[in-house]
Image: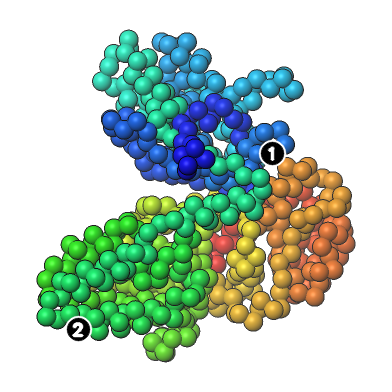
Amino acid sequence: MIESSFPQTGIGAILKTFRMKVSPRQRDYRWREHHVKTLFEDLAKAMDSDDQEYFLGTIVSIPDEDGVLDIIDGQHRLATTSILLSRIRAFLLPTEPGIAKSLESFLSEYDRHQRSDVNKLKLNLTDNDFFGKWLLSPDLPPVLPDSASLSHKRLRAAFVTAANHVKAIVATVNEKGYGDKLNKWIDLIEKKATIILFRVPSRGNAYKMFETLNDRGLRTTQADLVKNYLFGRAGDREAEAMHSWAKMVGALSSLQSEDADVDDDKDDITVIFLRCALMCIGGFLRKNAVYERVQNEAKGPQTVISHLAQLESLARTYERTFYQDHEFWKPYPDSMRYAIQMINEFDIKPFRPALVAIADKFDVKEATKSFQFFVSLGVRMLIAASTRSGSVEETMAKVAATIYKGEIKTTAKLKEALADITPSDGEFSTAFETATLSKGPLARYYLRSMERVVQQTHYPWFVPVEDKDLMTLEHVLPEHSDGNWPQFSEEEHAAYWRRIGNLCLLPKSLNCDLRSAKEKEKFAVYKDVPYELTRQISEVKHWTKETIAERQKGLSKLALKAWPL
């Protein structure tokens, strides 16, 4: 029944059959080189497997009135697969032009209304021109200048990685065998590497579908598996084991009903904590490997009790990292409590093992410095859209274990260990120059922090809670222009109204009166507000996409001062 309702289809067949687009609301291309390589390696494993299908996951979309699919989830898999097919095509052009020609059906088609070829997959406004230009080109994109957007750099890296992967595929055959070798990969992509494509009628239904798909895991059961295993291995010390388990769960109870550390799939807090603690003790492990790790760590009564003692202690530390007002932090300076508050506002889940290890092992001075560093690191990674990278989670887990073992004891050493995943000043500044924001609290935080840099205040990265009732977020170019902003096309409006350069702070009483007002009316209000960065906007003659970009470039320099390394 399920198979007939949701058939699996080759991802290549999806590219060949449908025209798709990534709406301006969706993020830019963000896959790093290791993400691209992981997909190609998975496809290589599928090539060597005897299985009839290799499942790549789900893609959620909304068909528009012309039948074009608006992609809600899955753009990176689709774009990266298209890039791989484009590099296979480019490689085969000199020796197998017929096969190369056939690959165009995966990448583009003739639009009789536009009277030209159009790409099967259209990325968002930021990336589409770059993506489309090189998709059917026999050449690779040239090295980009430092000022190029982060997404364009990553797209270029994906093209280069794909080209290198194609060369590796044919490395064992001569020129006459290129076509046969790569034909097998084309067949794999078209038929064997499958996805489930969901086409739902509305954005609300799409996100509900996505939530439902991610609410089917059995990881909550791991808590019972772990508990029963430990009790069974405790022997005549079972009562002692049960007591330790109860104290561990009790320390976590205040977090169970909160959103602060609940994954998108609504995991049991006990499982989330166990994974975090086990990474502190022994390094990275995957979400579904908690039970297996415990089996390896605790095999007899003594090791069970020792293991539970560690978990019980770490549970108390874990809880403290969520509450800046916990009594544990009384000996610490105010800057530590401010840092804890902001880190929890960010809610970057891969950070937690390292934070727990720092709180458990570092002295007051070094822990405070390290938590302040994590504020800067959090902002930089959020702006660079790198918080969900697998390498971030693995690196953080490795560092957490190193701290927990006592091998890292200072913030300086911590920074060295995290250097590979820390966005540099250049990377952060470049990403900041084109960043968009959809979350009001984060936008207010960024602007208020930079305002405090201008005012030369202490802790520029900290925003007092009471400010939330005093200030509000203003979009200069409003969400709904009501015909008052003709200098912006529809696509430009969608791309620029959420840009950081288009945002400013206003006293709450003023924002509701402006809404979609014309720029002159807004500027007249801006010149008298108590925020310097807002007043500066009133000095601009005309608000355009170029003005927004220029202002955002200036803000990126303040950002480096607000969140230094």
- Return the residue nearer the eye: 210 or 101: 210
Q: Which mark is residue 64?
A: 1
Q: Quadrant of residue 228?
A: bottom left
**Is the residue marked by circle 2 packed among few (<14), some (14-19), or many (20+) residues within 10 Å?**
few
Q: Image check: 289 left or right of 152?
A: left
Q: Residue at x 58, y 59 (%)?
A: 557
Q: Quadrant of the C terminus?
A: bottom left
User: Residue extending furthest front?
Assistant: 1
Q: Residue at x 87, y 49 (%)?
A: 483
Q: Which mark is residue 376?
A: none
Tell me the element at label 2: helix
- Return the residue nearer the eye: 273 or 397: 273
Q: Quadrant of residue 416?
A: bottom left
Vertical position of residue 411 compared to residue 465: above or below: above
Residue that mark 2 sits on: 239
Q: Residue at x 50, y 20 (%)?
A: 103
Mark 2–mark 1 CB contact (< 8 Å) = no
Vertical position of residue 170 compared to residue 524: above or below: above
Q: Image check: 293 left or right of 554?
A: left
Q: Residue at x 36, y 61 (%)?
A: 219
- Across and down, in percent, residue 49 comes to 28, 32
Residue 476 visible: yes
Q: Amino acid at mark 1?
A: Asp
**Is the residue marked by circle 1 packed among few (<14), some (14-19), or many (20+) residues within 10 Å?**
few
Q: Amino acid at mark 2?
A: Ala
- Which dot, 2 or 1, sits closer to the camera? 2
Tell me which label, 2 or 1, sits earlier in the chain. Answer: 1
Residue 126 visible: no
- Across and down, in percent, residue 283 comes to 26, 61
Q: Image check: 192 left or right of 512?
A: left
Tell me the element at label 1: loop
